[in-house]
Image (spheres, helix red, strand yellow):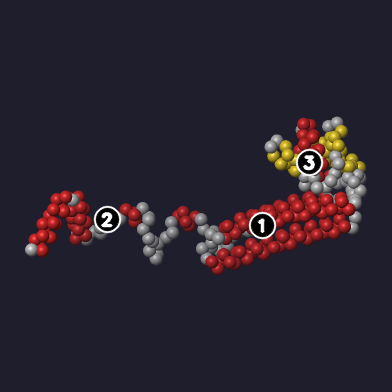
Amino acid sequence: MRRSVCLLLGRFYIRAHPDQLRAFTSVSAKSQGGQSPPTPYLQQAGFAKKGKQGGRGPVAESLDAPADGVDLTATKQSMDKAISHLQEILTGVRVGRASAGLLDALKVDLYGERLSMKAVGSVSVRDTHMLSVSPFDPQALPLIEKAIRDSPMKLNPRMEGQEILVPVPRPDADTVKAMGKLIKQEGEGTRMAIRAARRTALEQVKRMPSKDAQRQEEKKVQKLTDGFIKDVDSMCEQKEAELQRV
């Protein structure tokens, strides 16, 4: 009786779901004829688990860094550029003597941007204790004058006609202290630029397939960074020592 009940329920299910029966019959027929059953949709779309020999796909492979190491040429160029900028700034820092590079580190709020002094005007030496600034745009005169006055160097500029005259005071304790503060600010800005270049390089290193290779490249990047940071420290210390001798 139990068998009769099962057969009766089976006939009822087939009548209610004829599509299921056709799909099952089609798969069975192909399997018996030596053909493999249809590939599941998820496997066709690439969502099925890969086998041990399976590939990773073009997208994942394109994100990998070279297995033999990361090219640090661009990293070194970025760090070199930061060092060169610092050197230009420090060359202009001369207490008690006018130097055209003295104002290079200053930024001027103009046209909605913070521009360097070189971008807004030309600086020349009038005499050993006087600088002259000639703005490219005469309307920028008051903004340039304000930037010089508000700088940590404690200068006292004045506008005369279409130029700004900047007296360079003889060295005293306050002047030396202000210059020392400027050197520290520029040194820290250079270190930040060097560390930013390091972070960019490490992002490439993280995409290397081998953990051992990653550790080796990280050591190379850190060694390069340490060398440049050491140069920054040395340059700033030498300039600060020079100020103390004035």
User: Circle 3 sits on which residue?
Assistant: 147
Disc assigned to residue 16: none
Alpha-carbon distance for marks 1 and 2? 55 Å
Q: Nearer the viewer, residue 154 or 36?
A: 154
Relative image position of residue 62 (x, y in whole percent):
49, 55
Dot 2 alpha-carbon crowd within 10 angstroms: few under 14, some 14 to 19, many 20 or more = few
Q: Secondary structure at mark 1?
A: helix
Q: Residue at x 54, y 61 (%)?
A: 208
Alpha-carbon distance for marks 3 and 1? 28 Å
Q: Which residue type does callout 2 highlight? A: Pro
Relative image position of residue 153 (x, y in whole percent):
83, 47
User: Circle 2 sits on which residue?
Assistant: 38
User: Circle 1 sits on which residue?
Assistant: 195
Relative image position of residue 31 (x, y in whole percent):
21, 60
In the image, residue 123 sits, relative to residue 210, either above or below, namely: above
In the image, residue 113 sits, relative to residue 222, either above or below, namely: above
Q: Which quadrant would residue 35 be assigned to in this image?
A: bottom left
